């Protein structure tokens, strides 16, 4: 698949035309306003990631990669050691903006490896290599999403009901997205599905982003509250669950938006296949199990007051607001990656996936 600059520019994260800033579609404002932000400083990039102006594991990684390049341009030091230590510091700072999605550190480490591997070159030449690397990271994601969408499409039949949680569409990735990719690709090919989008409390990614993306693409989407998934499944309206992932451990446990593991438990109860779809950049073979994934805790006001015209809880009430949960691999039917569909035993087959990239392990 040939990726063009138009493909890149149409994504929710891209490099500005003059190549000096990271442009993001501000996802906090959707679905009511389409506003773009230009990020130039480390603080702006950090805040955009922390506050979810840019969100979704792959999109965060792409933003951080472009961010590292933009920061390298602004880094005035022309001797290798000062340049490289300034970028290492910037990379550590960006990585600290959100802990769970592995794509963030994965992308920053790839950019830093370019610097470290070219200590014999002058700084302007390293900047050129960094530009190539961040574009490669973006292009790879566009290709990976296209392949994941193809594999995902092979798992469902025309007319099927598909339930999804959070947002793993083009806004969170590139082009088709991951968990939503099969539905968008299907639509392009005249295959229709009935999609149920969980609204995804507390930040409402399902309502604000997933139903927005699918409705605009002409896909038959029905928005439901998170606590309605069980009834929708019981009614026989769901033939498969497709969700994204923020980090997949080596044993197949995976972190995704809070509420995902509940959907997986319900799916098991009703005998519905449950899939996570994600690029190989989201698989962290250095993380043995879900218990080793750090779960982000977020501001209690996301529960108490955000989105409401009046607070919905007393200001002093105690809140527990983990952004993600871990779904046990025993609840997973398969992991749909850009290199094929991985089935249990996940610990064995994920190893094989990296050892000999093949299909339908
Ligand atoms: O907190 P968010 O909105 O960044 O969480 C996003 C998710 O959990 C997505 O499902 C995941 O990143 C996959 S995006 C392709």
Image (cartoon, rainbow, N blue to C red):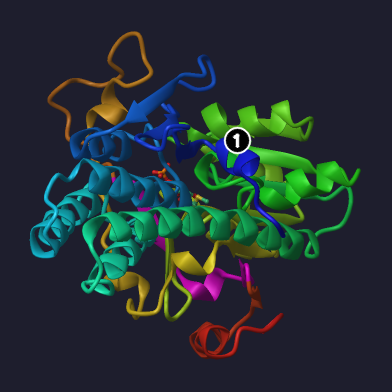
Does the segment drawn in magenta span residue 173? no
Near-viewer residue (293 or 265): 293
Near-viewer residue (32 or 292): 32
Q: Is residue 216 left or right of residue 353?
A: right
Query: Residue at (49%, 35%) from the top-left corner?
Result: 205
* Residue with the mark numbered 1: 10
Q: In this view, does 353 lie to the left or right of 321?
A: right
Query: Residue at (24%, 54%) from the top-left corner?
Result: 95
**Residue 254: x %, y % from top left:** 44, 66
Residue span colored magenta: 322-338
Secondary element type, mark 1: loop
Vertical arrangement, residue 99 with respect to residue 189, above or below: below
Near-viewer residue (291 or 91): 91
Residue 297 appears in the picture as rendered: no
Does the segment drawn in magenta span residue 324? yes
Residue 350 appears in the picture as rendered: yes
**Residue 71: x %, y % from top left:** 24, 44
Q: Quadrant of the C terminus?
A: bottom right
Q: Is residue 333 left or right of residue 202?
A: right
């Amino acid at each position: 698949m040939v990726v063009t600059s138009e493909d890149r520019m149409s994504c929710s994260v891209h490099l500005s035309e003059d190549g000096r800033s990271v442009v993001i579609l501000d996802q906090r404002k959707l679905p009511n306003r389409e506003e773009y932000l230009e990020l130039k400083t480390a603080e702006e990039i950090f805040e955009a990631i922390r506050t979810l102006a840019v969100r979704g594991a792959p999109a965060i990684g792409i933003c951080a990669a472009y961010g590292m390049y933009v920061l390298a341009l602004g880094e005035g030091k022309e001797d290798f050691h000062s340049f490289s230590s300034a970028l290492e510091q910037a990379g550590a700072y960006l990585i600290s903006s959100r802990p769970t999605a592995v794509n963030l550190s994965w992308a920053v480490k790839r950019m830093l490896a370019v610097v470290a591997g070219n200590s014999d070159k002058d700084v302007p030449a390293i900047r050129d290599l960094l530009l190539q690397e961040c574009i490669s990271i973006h292009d790879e994601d566009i290709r990976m999403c296209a392949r994941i969408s193809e594999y995902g499409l092979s798992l469902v039949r025309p007319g099927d009901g598909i339930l999804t949680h959070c947002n793993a569409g083009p806004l969170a990735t590139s082009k088709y997205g991951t968990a939503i990719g099969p539905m968008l690709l299907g639509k392009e090919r005249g295959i229709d599905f009935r999609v149920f989008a969980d609204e995804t409390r507390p930040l409402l990614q399902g309502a604000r982003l997933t139903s927005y993306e699918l409705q605009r693409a002409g896909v038959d989407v029905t928005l439901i509250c998170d606590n309605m998934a069980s009834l929708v499944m019981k009614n026989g309206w769901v033939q498969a669950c497709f969700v994204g992932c923020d980090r997949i451990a080596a044993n197949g446990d995976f972190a995704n938006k809070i509420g995902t593991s509940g959907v997986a438990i319900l799916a098991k109860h009703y005998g519905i296949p449950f899939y996570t779809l994600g690029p190989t950049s989201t698989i962290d073979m250095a993380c043995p199990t879900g218990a080793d994934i750090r779960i982000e805790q977020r501001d209690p006001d996301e529960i108490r007051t955000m989105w409401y015209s009046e607070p919905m809880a007393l200001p002093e009430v105690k809140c527990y607001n983990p952004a993600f949960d871990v779904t046990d691999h025993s609840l997973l039917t398969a992991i749909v990656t850009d290199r094929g569909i991985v089935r249990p035993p996940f610990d064995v087959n994920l190893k094989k996936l990296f050892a000999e990239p093949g299909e339908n392990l």
